[in-house]
Image (cartoon, rainbow, N blue to C red):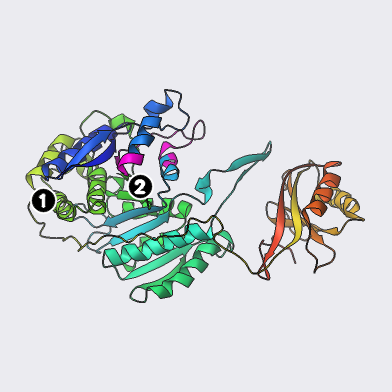
Amino acid sequence: MSKRVVTVIPGDGIGPECINAAVAIINAAGCNIEWEERHAGASVFKQGIPSGVPADTIESIKKTRVVLKGPLETPVGFGEKSANVTLRKLFETYANIRPVREYPGVTTPYSGRGIDLVVVRENVEDLYAGIEHMQTPGVAQCLKLISRKGCEKIVRTAFEFARAEGRKSVACATKANIMKLTEGLLKKTFEEIAPEYPDIESWHVIIDNAAHQLVKKPEQYDVIVTTNMNGDIISDLTSGLVGGLGFAPTANLGNEVAIFEAVHGSAPKYAGKDVINPTSVILSGVMMLRHIGEFEAATKIEDAVMVTIEEGKAATGDVVGYDKGAKTSVYTKTIIENLGRKPSKSQSRKYQAIKLPQISSDPVFVRPESRRVLGCDIFCEWPKGPEPLGQSLDKIAEGTPFRLKMISNRGTKVYPAGEALIDCVDHWRCRFVLRDEKADASAEQILDLLTRVSAVHQWMHVEKLLEINGEPGHTKAQGED
């Protein structure tokens, strides 16, 4: 048989040690894999490549379609974008799968509770689209983009993953009570698709309540599907319930490419000391093996890891303290020695291949029966209070098809004057609506209004106010009637 070629990216800091451990165990299990080493992250940033991902790495992934990757260092608050996010976006790995389970031998406040759940996180849109602008010198904006197509892909993946692992329920966690259009789109999509899976229990939960319930009663959850930012946060929370990020594997799944990686950071202070816990990458390798159909080898390695953790003879420093923990190399050797053994206190699930959703590639995923433009929001920079701004805009709108309905500051209506006591900033949303409530505003009318406003005020952003299928495609400000 020809070997399956897999791209392996050692990563930064402790990454090479984690990857070396995983590769050694996978090879010892007799898997028919050829490793093609490529690089990304800190070393690539230092070469002056802004993405952190060089061309030869991209070409390798296009060829192999499967990646096992160590942690990559990401600049914080400055510099280039995350190479991790770049890889996920380049290859449309839209589903981030983060399983956690209780490990016998790893004592936590939740030991004995039987935690065994999976967070399925949308992986390429939401705030992670990374579309940011300085609106004024003191006000920054990040666009939260949620698409119906993205929601359908992640929701269907969550249900299909539940079926593949024989799980019984899927909960959808959103902040739809506040972000009714963006987070609400995931909730709506979930509720429309859930009836197609009558064998799986489903319900919706507000994300902050989900976090509360995960701490209070985590065993009630089986699969949680959520948006990108929410998933990033609660998946770290869930790993903390079972011992930490060192025990949390992850898969980034797309229809063309799958990337398996550690969820923890590069921890440079531990690099090269042979003291870190490589379990996250090893179990990510197990998820990779199942993805490529090596189910027997995957279970063999998973069982060996469980035996090793259960017996505690090679416990790593993050479990028993770095002054007395087993060396990474010893832990790896022990797992290899335990290949073929079965744990006594846990057992592997009966896995089957995941049927990833096949969604239309047409960019126009939703075709409404009707749409109408009701007006526009013009965002202005203004150094004074709302009253003089409102009076000026009222005068500018005279003789146009539009009237100024209200002005808001950081989401709260401040003009016409209300009762809100708000500490304003120099960023104002000025909402203009058509005087004729049944009309449809043209682009020319909006451009004319914008030209009139720009002759007097500094503006930085404009949004059309849509009505789609008779429903408003925009939200109201706090206090807006």
The answer for how far apart the CA atoms under marks 2 and 1 are is 36 Å
The residue wearing badge 2 is 257
Which numbered disc flags the more N-terminal residue, 2 or 1? 2
Disc 2 crowd rating (10 Å Cα; few below 14, some 14-19, many 20+) is many
Left or right of 259? Residue 320 is left
Q: Where 130 sits versus 179, above or below?
A: above
Residue 313 found in image quarter: top left
The answer to whether marks 2 and 1 mark residues whose Cβ atoms lie closer than 8 Å is: no
Left or right of 11? Residue 374 is right
Left or right of 352? Residue 437 is right
Q: Is residue 218 visible?
A: no
Q: Which of 365 and 316 lies nearest the eye of the viewer?
A: 365
Please give the name of the residue rendered at 48% of the width and 29% of the height, measured from the top-left corner.
50
Residue 209 found in image quarter: bottom left
- Tag 1: residue type? Glu
> Closer to us: mark 2 or mark 1?
2
Q: Which of 144 and 30 lies nearest the eye of the viewer?
A: 30
Q: x%, y% of residue 433?
A: 79, 60
Which residue occupies the extreme top position in the image? 47
What are the residue bounds of the magenta stretch?
62-86
Please give the name of the residue rendered at 33% of the width and 53% of the height, measured from the top-left corner.
98
Q: Which of 156 and 80 lies nearest the eye of the viewer?
A: 156
Rendered-image quadrant of the N terminus: top left
Q: x%, y% of residue 452?
A: 86, 46
Q: x%, y% of residue 231?
A: 42, 54
